[in-house]
């Protein structure tokens, strides 16, 4: 009888040891997985899902956090509610830091999305007549960019300043009537104006075809401020986990996906030597 009890005790102890070891194994594996929250605007997260699959092997779990406007992702990043964000251009980020006294930096590039001039009334930029109406975005970053686009098209001249406004127009030979609208309304204004400068994202949502635009922003070294970036708080810029995410993003397979999903609206920025 004593031998049976002894065998039972030994058996229970062995079983308990296995349970403890398995439990520790699971705990250890779980402790090595790191969740990184990345803020984006809009609901199109196909690229980030692909990046997430790539970094799983490194024990990194990417969690996408969607925001409805351009103010929330940087606020959330500054307050450490998210770890990274990917929605803004360098210009937007720099302007945000200046006005909100934050210290957010770029740790990687995503895409360059050229602005374009669209029209439902003319087929060529040379058809613009004196007094024609042209609408542009009214926020500081995009207004300046739109005016620089009009200048590069030879329609106006502006002062050489980082973020020009309509007050910086020094020459307007065609006396174009330039109206400022919320960026999201520029595509809708095409029924009321001769032409409109429309952001890539807005144009995509409005089903406009970049190939039908009458003028498109050229990608040059001067385009660097308009590159979309992956941003972090400055103190985290050398975080090895975040660097792995950037490396997974800035890759040939992700470049192919960007071209597949966004066609002529966006191009992988890290592939442009002039932007490096």
Image (cartoon, rainbow, N blue to C red):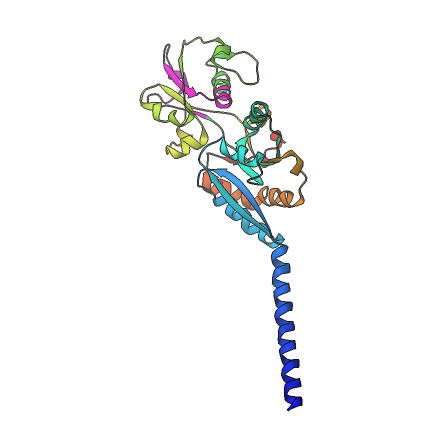
Left or right: residue 16 versus residue 52 is: right
To which quarter of the image does residue 204 belong?
Answer: top left
174 above or below 211? Answer: above
Residue situated in front as seen by the camera: 119 or 140: 140
**Magenta run includes residue 140:** yes
Residue situated in front as seen by the camera: 173 or 192: 192
236 above or below 116? Answer: below
To which quarter of the image does residue 185 belong?
Answer: top left
Residue 51, horizontal then vertical, whole percent: 55, 47
Count of numbered circles on the image: 0
Residue 234, horizontal then vertical, whole percent: 65, 34
212 above or below 56? Answer: above
Left or right: residue 78 versus residue 259 is: right
Residue 232, horizontal then vertical, whole percent: 60, 36
User: Would residue 80 be visible to someone looking at this image?
Assistant: yes
Say which quadrant the C terminus sits in. Answer: top right
The single residue placed furthest to the bottom in the displayed view is 1
To which quarter of the image does residue 184 belong?
Answer: top left
**Magenta run includes residue 21:** no
8 above or below 51? Answer: below
Residue situated in front as seen by the camera: 238 or 23: 23
Tell me which segment is drawn in magenta.
116-145
Residue 206, horizontal then vertical, whole percent: 37, 32
The single residue placed furthest to the left in the displayed view is 191
User: Would residue 120 be visible to someone looking at this image?
Assistant: no
Say which quadrant the N terminus sits in. Answer: bottom right
The residue at 50%/42% (across/down) is 65
């Amino acid at each position: 009888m004593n031998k049976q009890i002894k065998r039972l005790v030994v058996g229970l102890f062995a079983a308990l040891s296995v349970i403890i070891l398995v439990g520790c194994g699971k705990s250890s594996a779980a402790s090595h997985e790191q969740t990184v929250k990345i803020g984006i605007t809009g609901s199109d997260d196909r690229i980030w899902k692909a990046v997430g699959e790539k970094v799983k092997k490194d024990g990194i779990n990417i969690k996408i956090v969607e925001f409805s406007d351009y103010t929330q992702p940087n606020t959330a990043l500054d307050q450490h509610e998210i770890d990274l964000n990917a929605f803004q251009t360098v210009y937007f980020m720099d302007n945000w830091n200046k006005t909100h006294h934050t210290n957010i930096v770029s740790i990687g590039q995503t895409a360059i999305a050229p602005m374009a001039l669209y029209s439902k009334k003319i087929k060529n930029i040379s058809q613009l007549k004196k007094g024609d109406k042209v609408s542009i975005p009214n926020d500081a970053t995009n207004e300046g960019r739109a005016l620089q686009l009009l200048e590069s098209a030879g329609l106006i001249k502006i002062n050489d300043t980082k973020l020009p406004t309509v007050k910086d127009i020094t020459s307007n030979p065609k006396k174009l009537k330039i109206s400022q609208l919320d960026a999201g309304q520029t595509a809708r204004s095409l029924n009321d104006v001769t032409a409109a400068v429309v952001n890539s994202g807005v144009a995509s949502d409005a089903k406009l075809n970049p190939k039908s635009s009458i003028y498109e922003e050229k990608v040059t070294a001067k385009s660097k401020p308009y590159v979309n970036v992956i941003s972090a708080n400055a103190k985290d810029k050398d975080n090895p986990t975040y660097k792995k995410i950037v490396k997974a993003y800035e890759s040939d397979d992700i470049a192919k996906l960007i071209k597949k999903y966004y066609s002529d609206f966006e191009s992988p920025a890290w592939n442009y030597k002039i932007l490096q």
